[in-house]
Image (cartoon, coloured by chain):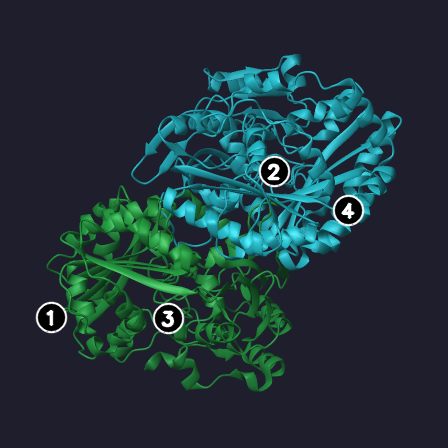
Amino acid sequence: MSSVASLPVIGQPVREALGVLFGEHVSFRKTDRLAYHRDLMPGSLLTVREGEASTCPDAIVWPQTVQDIVALLALANEHKFPIVPYGAGSSVVGAAIPIRGGVICDLKRKARLVRMDEKSLLYTAEAGILGEDLERKLNAAGFTCGHFPSSMYCSTLGGWLAMRSAGQMSTRYGKIEDLVVSLEAVLPSGQVIQTRNAPRSATGPDIDQLLVGSEGTLGVITRATLRMFPLPETRRFASAVFATVEQGLEAVRSIMRIGCRPAVVRLYDEVDTALALSSLGLDVTGNLLILGYEGRERIVSSELAASHEALADGRDLGEEPGKWWFEHRYKISYKQSIILANDRMVLDTLEVAATWTRVLDVYAAVKKALEGYVTVLAHFSHAYPEGINIYFSFVGHAGETRPVEFHQEMWRRALGAVAESGGSISHHHGIGLLKAPWLKRELGGLHEAFVAFKAELDPNNILNPGKMGLP
Amino acid sequence: LSLVDLQARVPALRISTRDTDRLNYARDLYPLTHIWMGEAKVGQRPRAICWPASTQEVAAVVQWALETATPLVPYGAGSGVCGGTLPGPDTLIVDLKAMRAVVDFDERSLLVRVQPGMLGEDLERWLAKRGYTLGHFPSSIYCSSVGGWLAARSGGQFSTKYGKIEDMVVSQELVLPDGKIVRTATTPRAATGPDWDQLFVGSEGTLGFITEATLRVCLAPEIRHFRAFRYPSVPAALEGMRAVMQAGLRPAVTRLYDEIDTFLVGSKKPAPESKPFDAEPMSSLKGKLKGEPAFLQAAHRAAFRHPKLIHALVDALPGSCLLIFMFEGNTILTDAEASEAWAILKQSGGKDLGSAPAEAWYETRYHVSYRQSAIYAADAFVDTCEVATTWSAIEDLYFGMLRAVRPHAIIMAHFSHAYHEGVNIYFTFAAHAGDADGKEQLYQKIWKTLMESCLRYGGTISHHHGIGFSKQAWLAQELGGGMEVFQAAKRALDPHGIMNPGKMGLGNGGRV
């Protein structure tokens, strides 16, 4: 692990200033710097498995107040060093990797649930609160945040917002951009902004929606107000197995088209049903569709009734597979280490959304591009009236090739196929480092506008530089 | 010289410098310009108007404007009520109404791709013919365009079910202020950075041209359920509305009228016949609006001169507020939603008035906007102010703004776009002042009072009319520091400040 000793980008005066600002809440220790030199991007796990480390941060700070962050940004602007805002480091695209060193700004000490407005069904929380803690606190008061990413145990509210997260029940409750009502953030200049806590405004471009998804490049999100929901009166499932993916997709499309809002819609293709679900103990073959509705009894019943006809082409499997999925829904992400323990194996996941008109093309194109290279599993989750997301999992053996290179080639093939077949390169994992070259391709001229916008907001380029194809 | 040059570059481009055209485009529906008109005053006339017929022509106009430092104002149907399209003397108005086609309809994905100059009525009719609806029904549907909806962040009367325009847009084609043509991806959702569509939605022509948009459509409803309820007070009725919204139900319409607004709604006669779909032809509407009785005009005149008297009278009446609902959509889902809602509303103390008052609203829903001329004829003026806040703050905002404005004008309100976390208030105010200067002064004073009291009580200064020219002084305070983000976007995209200068608090964008 040689690069821990790579040239520091901050000098002694900055170290001293950080010491004064943060006291015991700054670390320059080698172990901390190593711990923060990567996130959960599988490519970085493969590098570590080979015994190598990429660039480490020079320091980690744990601010507690907005003023701490303002002071940190002032120092960074003065001395021109990078700052990487950091939540719980669960990004799978390398968004939190400090590729140019500098200072990690870990927000986990800012983790209070500040207030619940039970009349407006809103809560305000600091950015560093972990998903699990947030949900437990809301549950204790009879509410839910409605946002359940599979990273629930290892991701923060600030990370959700910065990365444009989507939870497993997004089809009912909305994705993070639909849930956020207002936010507090520190701009690169040190300006603290607090957007208006209104249900909707026609007061210019939606500033919240420019910071949501900015992945730490445009500001540090420090606090936010989001919708919460009463805990559901009831939760019911339906499921069916279909002979083909096409039939299963057609069922989902007709359910979404009439205006149903299932909390859970998941269609597993045959391979995913056989490999992923059976590895967790569910014995089903075919393309399994799980539907889950929750909320008020009368509404849930009507939605189940309205969905019934759409399932007619499948074989009805009743409530059990849905209940089983609900019990196991966070387990699959923790099965990866078993595979990665074999030092020739690689794995990764790709989530792409497409309109109903294009989704089968995208599905087929990605499978074809990786045929004979890796095993491809897919399920369709996060459904919309106009389309659906495909969540691919790739598992492969690198053979004689270096696993890191084998893995890179896998990504080139997969994203090339997505771009050519009309999908978007990310539904909810974000861009970070991994997908930066393809972002330029997807946005075209708008990417140049993004670069110019970033330069105006952050002229010294201190916030998370080098990500998303930005300088 | 330079317009000749533009014509030479784009020979097919229609350009006009005629006085009648310049006069027409000297104003939009900003009521201050009505007041001026009543006094035979005219605002600034633009230098010229052009009607590009394609995205390429728009790009060519932008190129030319860059080279000649000509300010451009993108123009839809001119129904903005905040002066967002008011030109300067050098301005070239770029009217997009020649670009008004449906480009593509993806029935399978429920997406329609449409050009910006298409009028709301035309698009809704086009979709209705095929069994679909956009679900977007601003009261300006006869005189507003798709591009205008997007640029000014429109919200329709059925937005509680179908969403506002920002929820409907999936992708756009844009001409940036450097002349470049760009497109966002047509995909249900993407985590590919900031949402660029949402940068241009609401930018009111300051960041570029929207030259095409892909919008979500829905199946035309199978069924509609109407119902009205009476409550003793605004706070009691708001609780009923909140209970329905927070139960997760999605009425297409939920509207609560305060005491004065209820009184006026009750005096409206329903239209004789209802139409099979939503956009009623303009011609039939005109017929219904003829002949405002003379006594009503006299009553208007008397009332506007004595706002305090009217308010005292209303306060003395026994309180009564009307709350109306409409659910529509798939039969099974809509039946369940409506019956759940009616149960919740009865439980919250609403007196069930049956369906008639709600159906009457539905049938006359576009009429009210066309009744304003009577008030101007009475030598008074009328305007509307739409604000919003959370349920916790709504009573303070409503009563606070009422108290602040009552000394100056007759003011009434309805609450018309409800959300999980809050609701909007749509104030209508009317006032009368003796001479012309006094009228404009009073008008400005009322707006200042509205905006300052709105911000004081925690409201957002615009729910769906936008900022434009008239509200720009309050935008920086509204955005709570976010103006820096907007300004950065403006400098990045339009460093020469050619796009709609002098609006939205952006100044002249660095123009010399």
Residue that mark 2 sits on: B497
Identify by letter the chain in cyan: B
Image quadrant in which you'd find residue B396: bottom right
Q: Chain of mark 2?
A: B
Do circles 3 and 1 both sit on a common chain? yes
Toward the right, the furthest residue is B434
Q: Nearer the viewer, mark 2 or mark 4?
A: 4
Left or right for A79, reference B32: left
The crowding category of the residue bearing disc 4, from other C-alpha atoms within 10 Å (few below 14, some 14 to 19, many at least 20), is some
Inspect the image, locate mark 1, and give the three-letter code of the amino acid beneath it. Answer: Glu
Residue shown at 64%/72% (left/top)? A67
CA separation in Å, label 2 and label 1: 58 Å
Pointers 3 and 1 in contact (CB under 8 A)?
no
Q: Element at badge 2? A: loop
Regarding residue B203, the answer to whether it shows in the image is yes
Q: Position of residue B39 (x, y in %)?
A: 81, 20
Query: From the viewer's perspective, is B57 left or right of B432?
Result: left
Distance of label 2 from label 3 (alpha carbons): 44 Å
Find residue A228 and report its horizontal and vertical position in percent: 51, 63
Labelled pair 1, 4 in contact (Cβ < 8 Å): no
Q: Which residue is mark 1?
A: A400
Secondary structure beneath label 3: loop
| Residue type at tag 2 | Gly
Let me know if marks 2 and 3 both belong to one chain: no
Between marks 3 and 4 in the image, the one whose residue lies nearer the viewer: 4
Residue under circle 3?
A151
Asked if the residue under mark 3 is in contact with the one under mark 2, i.e. CB atoms within 8 Å, the reply is no
Q: Do discs 2 and 4 belong to a common subunit?
A: yes
Q: Chain of mark 4?
A: B
